[in-house]
Image (cartoon, helix red, strand yellow):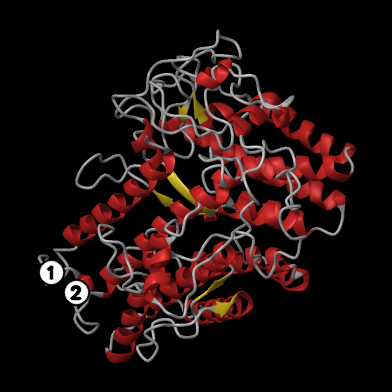
Amino acid sequence: MVDKEIIMKNFKITFTLLFFMAFLISSCETTELDLRVSPNDLSADQADPNLLLNSIQLAYASNQAELSDEAAELTRIDYFFGRNYFNQIGGDVLNDVWARTYSSGNNDIGTLIDVGILTNLQALESINENTETDFSFHVAVAQTLYAHSLFQIVDFIGEAVASQAGNPEFPAPILDSGEEVYAAAFSLLDQAEAALALEPADQGAQDLFYQGDTDNWIRLINTIRLRSYVLTGNTTAFNAIIAGGNFIAETSQDFELSYGTSELQPDNRHPDYAADYTPSGANIYQSNWMMELMLNNNDPRIRYYFYRQSNATPGADAPPSEDQLACSLVVPPPHYAGLTYCSVSNGYWGRSHGNDEGIPPDNIARTAVGVYPAAGLFDDNRFADVDLGLGGGGAGIEPIFLASYVDFWRGIMASSDADRATFLRAGLEKSIAKVQSFGALDGSADLSLAPSDMDVTAYIDGIVSAFNAATGDDRENIFAEQYFTTLFGGATESYNYYRLTGFPTTVLPNWEPDPGPFPRTFRRPQNEVINNPNVDPSTSLTNQVFWDTNPASPTFPPAN
């Protein structure tokens, strides 16, 4: 059986390696490095700093894509396969993320991950200290990406290696507490900001994100601080950064990775596009909860997020089909009474949370990723099959930190519901405008079916009015649903928000009445457990991150 998780992880490893090789080849005019030798096999004083920085950026980008997928699946933004959380989230899930971050040498055979962010950062620091050329730009960028990676490992595992990481005196480094790692990450951001404030030259580095713009890198540093202050509830520090105004506040400042359209040598297309736009049809199942939420809300982003190959779904507005959608013949269990167990109408053909059925021959029927963010097809009711090269050809983005996300954070931290409504509106305005701009990537699209300015205004006005009129959980659900919809494609922070607040409570339950406690953290990476005697295996998913002060599992989150 093929599922999205396996497809995506294997593809992202391949994408990273091929993309990196492309940089090696493209660099042959500017370096005398023998291209038959990997820069990761050279000592620090031999390696090309630009290639080291490329490797760091690509390892980081691969981690962002993988963590976003894991978060999206748990929070119903994407489809999650599996009726038992503990069995599905095994000890191997974060092996590659850990290896790309630390280069601990404990990598799976076949992953080809030799050197990751920390090891290459240390090499850059050594080069910067021992050569006359100023490579402080490289070091500062690497420190920024490593700091964010440390925050994320804590958010997913609850602890991380920090104080002894990369130190040869500690071949078996201990795990530091979440609070200690957060402090270390904040310190790294301080160092990076101090270096970037001097506007160092990029020395020809290929900056995949901001093209050497130090001002934007400092905005990113402050934005990483903001997301961390949201989780720790540090309102004073959060407001101080907002008052300074130096954070990602406009779409032009968004932190994202841009993909290309090349299928081979390297395949640099958006991974979701590569998985879905094939001669045999789509391979990813979309989340029934997300599609139905947007359909019921008449969300103007739905034609951009999803591309329908069919105009009707078995069991909803077409006859049930045992061959293509077996669950359309099933009477939903009691815990799914009144909820969408199998089928969303209007051809939005996906799967509900936890569905572990086998894969039927529905590749040319299921809903595929759309033009945002994967640069597929805009849904203009053509209901044609997906195929290679269609739409935007995969030249989409991996959203990491967008200005629209920051507006929602400001709403989370706002002191009044009136202010929350203001930031809810601002976040929706930025999100919808950015999403709609992707319609132009699909040159075959009939954009007369795109929402008009009046449609968009009516939608935003309606959401904000509903938020203002609601109270209690209803109000929280409206805010959280719109936040999650905005996070589509870059959903890492949805997992954090869900554990921080428990909202939205409107998400679909697992297909299994008793899937086990919702994962408050992931298990420690199996490879590190095997090779490091100071890291014990995780025996549950119920350990809580230090900023997760909610009731213990299984009573929280309430929807689970």
Q: Nearer the viewer, residue 530 or 381?
A: 530
* Image coordinates for residue 497, horizontal then vertical, percent: 68, 54
Image quarter where the N terminus lies is: top left
Residue 290 visible in this rendered orientation of the protein? yes
Picture quadrant of residue 129: bottom left
Q: How many marks?
A: 2
Q: What is the three-letter code of the residue carrying label 2?
A: Asp
Residue 381 position, x and y percent, is 50, 15
Q: Secondary structure at mark 2?
A: helix
Q: Nearer the viewer, residue 110 or 195?
A: 110
Q: Is residue 270 visible?
A: no
Left or right: where 273 falls relative to 461? left
| Residue 168 image label | none
* Amino acid marked by disc 1: Val
Q: Quadrant of the C terminus?
A: top right
**Numbered tag placed on residue 41 in the rendering:** 2
Relative to 552, 395 lies left or right: left
Image location of residue 253, percent across then percent down? 53, 56
Asked whether disc 1 touches disc 2, contact meaning CB atoms under 8 Å apart, the reply is yes
Which residue lies under the disc numbered 1? Answer: 37
Q: Secondary structure at mark 1?
A: loop
Judging depth in this view, the residue of 327 and 490 nearest the camera is: 327
Judging depth in this view, the residue of 329 and 72 nearest the camera is 329
